[in-house]
Image (cartoon, helix red, strand yellow):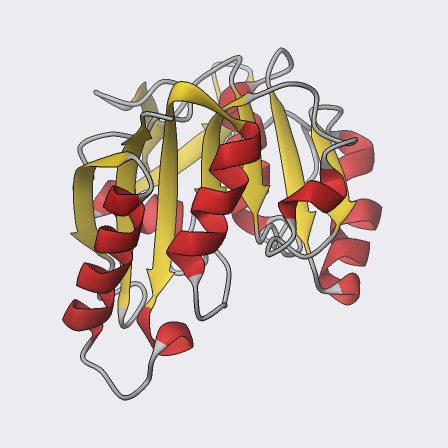
Amino acid sequence: MQVKPHSRFPQVYVVTLDDGTERLATRNLAPGRTVYGEKLVRFEDVEYRLWDPFRSKLAAAILKGVKTVPIKPNHQVLYLGAASGTTASHVSDIVGEKGHVYCVEFAARALRELVNNVCPYRRNMTPILEDARFPERYVLFVRGRVDDIYCDIAQPEQAKILADNADLYLKNDGWIMLAVKAQSIDVTKEPSEVYKRELKVLESRGFTIEDVVHLEPYDKAHAMIVARFKG
C-alpha cells in the first residue's frame, strides 16, 4: 500500500491499495474513529480515512476532475446541509485543528447523529440545528466571515439560499461549492436547464463561476459548481 498527497489539493491523499486500486482519502483528525463506516488505513504511522465518492459529492467532484477545491488547511467553512457528517468530517480533516467547520442542518435526527458520533471527537466542528433558508438565525454561532461555503441542500432555490448565506457570512473573494440537485429544484426540466438557471442566479448575486462538473456516475442529475464571490 502507498499513500501520496493529491497533486493539486492540500490534505487530500491518494491511496494505492494492495490490489492496485486507487482511492481518495483524508488524514483522520480523530484517529481510531469512523463516521460512516469508511475504511481506515495506516501508512508510516499516520491514519487515513478512505473517502467514498458514492457517499460524498465533494469526493465525486475531485474524481470527476474539478479544477479547484477552495477548502484548504486553516480555513473557516460554513457547511449548509451537513446531515450526519459524511462529507463534513472530511472537510474537518482538510481544514485541520486551526480551521473550523460550521455545520448547519435542519433535520433533527441527522444533526443528532452529528452531535453524538462526530463533533465530540472533532473540536473544529460546530453543529447548528437551523434552516439554511434563514441565515440570520445562526449569526451568533458563526465567528466572523468564513473563507468558503459548501452547500448540499435539497431545496428548490439552492443557489439563492447559498447567496443569501454568502451575503452574511462569506468574505469578499471567498469561494463557494454548490452541489446542485436538479430533481430537488424542478423534476419537470432537464438537469442541464436547472444547472443553467442556478448558474444565472449565482452570477446575478455577484459570483464568478470558475468550474462546473457533472457528478455521474456517482450521483445522478447532480453537478458541482465552484464560484468566487465579489460581494
Q: Is residue 123 above or below residue 90?
A: above
- Left/right placement of residue 73 relative to residue 64 reads right
- Left/right placement of residue 76 relative to residue 52 reads right
Q: Is residue 37 visible?
A: yes
Q: Position of residue 207 (x, y in %)?
A: 28, 36
Q: Is residue 20 visible?
A: no
Q: Residue at x 49, y 68 (%)?
A: 155
Query: Furthest residue to the bottom?
Result: 188
Q: Nearer the viewer, residue 164 or 94?
A: 164
Q: Residue at x 70, y 31 (%)?
A: 125
Q: Nearer the viewer, residue 225 or 6?
A: 225
Q: Position of residue 3 (x, y in %)?
A: 35, 24
Name the quarter where the N terminus is drawn.
Answer: top left
Quarter-of-image position of residue 209? top left
Q: Position of residue 178 (x, y in %)?
A: 37, 48
Name the quarter where the C terminus is drawn.
Answer: top left
Q: Is residue 140 above or below residue 180?
A: above
Q: Residue at x 64, y 15 (%)?
A: 97
Q: Is residue 149 above or below residue 196?
A: above
Q: Nearer the viewer, residue 200 or 71?
A: 200
- Left/right placement of residue 169 relative to residue 129 reads left
Q: Residue at x 60, y 50 (%)?
A: 82
Q: Position of residue 142 (x, y in %)?
A: 70, 28
Quarter-of-image position of residue 174? top left
